[in-house]
Amino acid sequence: MKITITIITALILTGFTYLNSNAEVYYTISENSDPQDALKESIERGETVYEDFCMQCHLPTGEGVAGVYPPLAKADYLLKKRKAAIHAVKYGLKGEITVNGNTYNSVMTAPGLYDDEVADVMNYILHSWGNTSPKMVTEAEVKAIQE
């Protein structure tokens, strides 16, 4: 029993990684984490998610396709409608939206991402192609967005 408590205490104090049953890393907990390091790591993971799920429509440069797929590069929608943007990545999007003064009315299917992946790809998008966000998207923020 004493060994178990010692091991658990050591894990909590030094940081540990939570794995799901498929051995995918969801998040790392560490008391000494620098928020900038956490953002940087999220952006790096988000780039991979973007390449796998978003790049086909929004292109490697985030420019989208005029009249069909809205741009993510320098996109006013991302900051003005933060919750709606997260909702779109989490659940998909159907209906009209306006990005940088242009109207788009395409369907974006839900990519089927976990909440941590949604947060990571949003952080990547919000810090790429001329976008800057003063606030990191967290898994808790994504989890709070309901369909």
Image (spheres, rainbow, N blue to C red):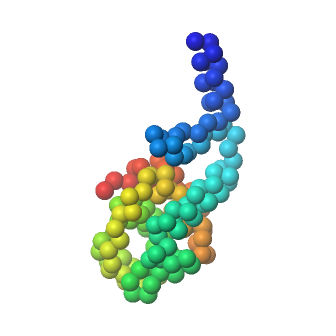
Question: Residue 11: in sight, yes or no?
Answer: yes
Residue 57 lies in quadrant? bottom left
Q: Quadrant of the N terminus?
A: top right
Q: Quadrant of the C terminus?
A: bottom left
Depth check: 12 or 146 in front?
12
- The structure residue drawn at horizontal position 60% and vertical position 75%, both measured from the top left corner, is 129
Question: Residue 73: in sight, yes or no?
Answer: no
Depth check: 131 or 17 in front?
17
User: Can you give x and y, in whole percent of width and height, for residue 81 in the image?
Assistant: 43, 67
Query: Is 62 left, or right, of 91 in this rendering?
Result: right
Is 37 drawn above or below residue 30 in the view shown? below
Query: Is 15 left, or right, of 88 in this rendering?
Result: right
Depth check: 62 or 80 in front?
62
Residue 31 lies in quadrant? top right
Is 95 drawn above or below residue 5 in the view shown? below
Is 54 drawn above or below residue 138 in the view shown? below
Query: Is 34 left, or right, of 139 in this rendering?
Result: right
- The structure residue drawn at horizontal position 47% and vertical position 47%, both measured from the top left corner, is 140
Outermost residue to the top: 1
- The structure residue drawn at horizontal position 47% and vertical position 44%, both measured from the top left corner, is 22
- The structure residue drawn at horizontal position 35% and vertical position 63%, both measured from the top left corner, is 110
Outermost residue to the front: 22
User: Can you give x and y, in whole percent of width and height, for residue 122 in the image?
Assistant: 51, 62
User: Can you give x and y, in whole percent of width and height, for residue 119 in the image?
Assistant: 50, 56
**Number of callouts:** 0
User: Can you give x and y, in whole percent of width and height, for residue 111 in the image?
Assistant: 39, 63
